[in-house]
Image (spheres, helix red, strand yellow):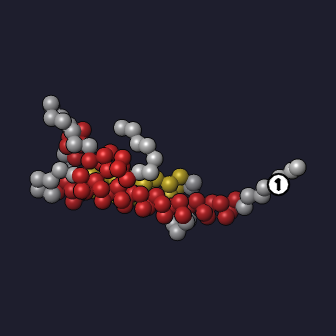
Amino acid sequence: MTARITINEAQLKRLVTSSSGPIVTKVNTLTRRTANMARTLCPVDTGLLRASINENVAVQGLTIVGTVSAETNYATYVHEGVRGRRGRPFLSDALKRVSPWPVTR
């Protein structure tokens, strides 16, 4: 018995990289949910750190990258901790809560 499979490469590329395709849509959804969860978990003093949380999805060729970042100059210190202060890893914790896949830090 022989099985023959024909792959339409143009259709596959469109499926993977189209902004309305299911893969980009899923990455957009997970990125948005992660950003929203990060805003919930973020420690608040003045609210500037929480307001600085941004999300972005970039498609280059067959690579799709969703990014969530906090843009204040002190975000890394809050997230990672400094000088004996424990960090509050709100970004990585948000990803752990939202992602359907295992996340290790």
In the rendering, at what x and y percent does residue 65 appear? 46, 53
Disc 1 is placed on an element classified as: loop
Image: 21 above or below 39: below
Give the residue at the far right of this rendering: 1
In the rendering, at what x and y percent does residue 20 appear? 52, 69
Q: Residue at x 32, y 45 (%)?
A: 92
Q: Residue at x 83, y 52 (%)?
A: 3
Give the residue at the far top of this rendering: 84
Q: Residue at x 88, y 49 (%)?
A: 1
Residue 57 seen anywhere in this rendered image of the structure = no
Q: Nearer the viewer, residue 79 or 5?
A: 5
Q: Residue at x 56, y 61 (%)?
A: 17
| Amino acid bearing label 1 | Arg
Location of the C terminus by quadrant is: top left
In the rendering, at what x and y percent does residue 23 appear? 53, 60
Horizontal placement of 34 versus 78: left or right? right
Horizontal placement of 80 versus 67: left or right? left
The residue carrying mark 1 is 4
In the rendering, at what x and y percent does residue 60 appear? 52, 55
